Amino acid sequence: MVVQIDKPPAHEKSKQVHSSVTEKLTDPGWAWSAYQPDAQRPWTLAQAGHLYRRAAFGATWDQLQQALSDGPQRTLDKLLRPQADIAAFNRAYDEYSSGTGSADGLRAWWLRRMILTPHPLLEKMTLFWHSHFATNITKVKSARMTRQYIQLLRSQALNSFRAMLKGISCDPAMLIWLGAEANRKARPNENFARTLMESFTLGPGNYKEKDVQEAARAFTGWFVLRSKLRYIPREHDGNIKQILGQKGNFTGDDVIRIVLEQHATAETLVRKLYRRLICETQEPNAKLISPLAKSFAKDYDILKLAEKMLRSNLFFSAAAYRRRIKSPVEFALGIVKPLEAVISTTQLAQDLADLGQNLYEPPTVKGWTGGRHWINSSTMVGRHNLALALLQGSAPYGDKLNPWTVAKKHGCSTSESATGFLLDLFVQGDLEPDVRDNLLKPAGAPVDAGGDDSAGTVRRFAHVVVTLPEFNLA
């Protein structure tokens, strides 16, 4: 299977983007204004599906239909600020996870949380920051510390990047993972300071080696002892340091302040979130990024930045539609969520690890590379096999996911009507006409009139749909 992410989406092909519209895509005033449906850019099932792929893990049929009725802005209101008691949900799951003493248990717990959460955008952003602030439980060797680290990310995933960065600088799991659990005055440990500048904030080329060395001195005195962060005053270097053009008797808190004052930090973070929420196939120009970076630098409010992107004309344009490859987690939950069931997340965690996304074990300090790196001949076979395992109605996932049952629930009485329903459910019917026709004709996917094998026919068809190149795109 070839996953093509460079051609226009099918629903845009009939009205190719004119040069004037192309120019708008790079105009910040138009690009970041809120999308308002009109005759040229209507609010459709395809647009609703696009929103739920980016701001959630897919949608049920009822959610898609409600979104069509509500329109984009009201739908976004619910995704950004759901009315459910999120705090109560988080407390219940945090209490449950407190008894989880293994990496496997934590992985299963988090996946179940992703499936059931009333605030899917929060979990997606927590997963995003888990890759940005990567730690690996294999080196940390503590489920408790890893759980605390993820709870820190979740608490700020849609809140303050400033607060999250400050918390990360004091997080035992992070310091152990980076080999920065001991920072003595006589021998400053540069590991955290280097990663802070290289990966967490400024980005390559925006600092000098001397900045790293001086920042390491500012963080001296901090140790992880018996799994807890401790400060030993006599081990702190209290002399003057010079970091990124500023001079003073700096501490670690000052380093956090200084790096956040640099324009490069806000720009680097905005570009990274752009790749996650808007498009990963084309790098945005500086003119497009500049107003968002300037606004973000004022308060580092993540929710405000995400909201600006998700409400925008650019987000709902052809330039963003199906311009990301789903991660393994997004691929799997994109099957599970629409079919309205909960499955064995212990098994799912292992299957996702086999596809390259082992939760709590990103491969490097830079997290998962993502994009085209998710796709190769081996992982595409793996996705095909995982989809089959989820949908076949037998071990290891049992009959939890039954597309025929879901189709009947929503008014389908024959397998023929169910196949059309599944196309709309999983890809919002947005396929090239010849692909759609081939799928729906008997030679492409046999259908019957609701006979004894209706369930089997619908399962097989569902598997065909979720292994289409289009389904692998977010």
Image (spheres, rainbow, N blue to C red):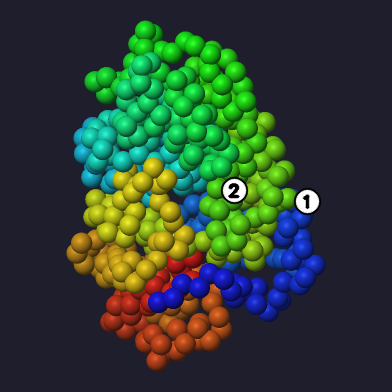
- The residue located at (23%, 45%) in the rendering is 104
Q: Which residue is mark 2?
A: 271
Residue sitting at the far right: 20
Disc 2, SS: helix
Amino acid of disc 1:
Gly
On screen, 28 above or below 233? below
Disc 1, SS: helix
Residue sitting at the far bottom: 443
Count neighbours of disc 1 (C-alpha within 10 A) and say few if under 14, some if 14 to 19, many if 20 or more: few
Q: Which residue is mark 1?
A: 29
Q: Nearer the viewer, mark 2 or mark 1?
A: 2
> Which x, y percent locates residue 299?
64, 30
How many numbered marks appear? 2
Q: As rendered, which of 205 and 394 lies closer to the eye?
A: 205
Count neighbours of disc 2 (C-alpha within 10 A) and say few if under 14, some if 14 to 19, many if 20 or more: many
- The residue located at (65%, 66%) in the rendering is 318
Q: Give residue 401's quadrant in the image.
A: bottom left
Residue sitting at the far top: 234
On screen, 34 above or below 399? above
Amino acid of disc 2:
Arg
On screen, 470 above or below 414? above
The answer to whether residue 402 shows anywhere in this view is: no
> Which x, y percent locates residue 402?
32, 66
Contact (Cβ within 8 Å) of mark 2 with mark 1 = no
The answer to whether residue 284 shows anywhere in this view is: yes
Does label 2 or label 1 sit earlier along the sequence? Answer: 1
